[in-house]
Amino acid sequence: MTYKLFCQQNPQELGIADEKGNWHIDKLEEHIKTCKECQIGLAKLFAGMLYPDFEIPDTVSEQTREMFEEECERIYIHKCLRCEYTWESLLKRPKTCPKCKSYTWDEERKRRKK
C-alpha cells in the first residue's frame, strides 16, 4: 500500500519515510503541525467528509486530536472583496484568496482621492 501526504510533497524528501517505505510517525506529526494543507485534509478525514464511519485512532496524541477536532468544528464561507470570489474553507481566516492570491482579500479596496 502506498501512502501520500495531503500536500502532495515527497515524504522521503521531508524525512518522514525512509528508502524502504517505512514512515516515522513522530516526523509525520511534526510535518502536520506546520502544514496547513495536511491539517485541513486530516480534519476533513476525521470529520467524516471523506469516510463517514471513520473514527480518530487511539494512537493519535491528545494535542493532535484536539487540533483536528477544532479544525473539524465548522466550515467557513469566505468572499474575496477584491475579486468577488466565494469559497468554503475549514480555516477561520485563510491567508490568501485561492483565486486572486490577495493577502488582503477581506479588506475593502481603498480608493485614492484625486
Image: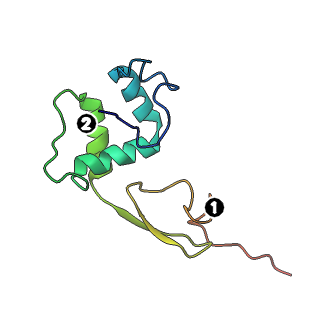
Give the quarter of the figure containing the C terminus: bottom right
Give the quarter of the figure containing the N terminus: top left
Q: On the rendered structure, is 59 left or right of 19? A: left
Q: Earlier in the sequence, mark 1 or mark 2?
A: 2
Judge the density around disc 1: few (<14), some (14-19), many (≥20) Cα neighbours within 10 Å. Answer: some
In the rendered image, residue 23, in percent from the top left (x then y), is placed at 35, 22
Q: Residue at x 29, y 42 (%)?
A: 68
Q: Is residue 97 above or below residue 12?
A: below
Q: On the rendered structure, is 81 left or right of 110? A: left
Q: Quadrant of residue 88?
A: bottom left
Q: Residue at x 40, y 34 (%)?
A: 32
Q: Secondary structure at mark 2?
A: helix
Q: Is residue 57 above or below residue 19?
A: below
In the rendered image, residue 12, in percent from the top left (x then y), is placed at 48, 25
Q: Secondary structure at mark 1?
A: loop
Q: Residue at x 24, y 46 (%)?
A: 46
User: Hey, what amino acid is under mark 1?
Assistant: Ser
Which residue was labeled with disc 2? 65
Q: Residue furthest left?
A: 53
In the rendered image, residue 25, in percent from the top left (x then y), is placed at 33, 23
Mark 1 → mark 2, Cα distance in angstroms:
32 Å
Judge the density around disc 2: few (<14), some (14-19), many (≥20) Cα neighbours within 10 Å. Answer: some
In the rendered image, residue 4, in percent from the top left (x then y), is placed at 39, 37
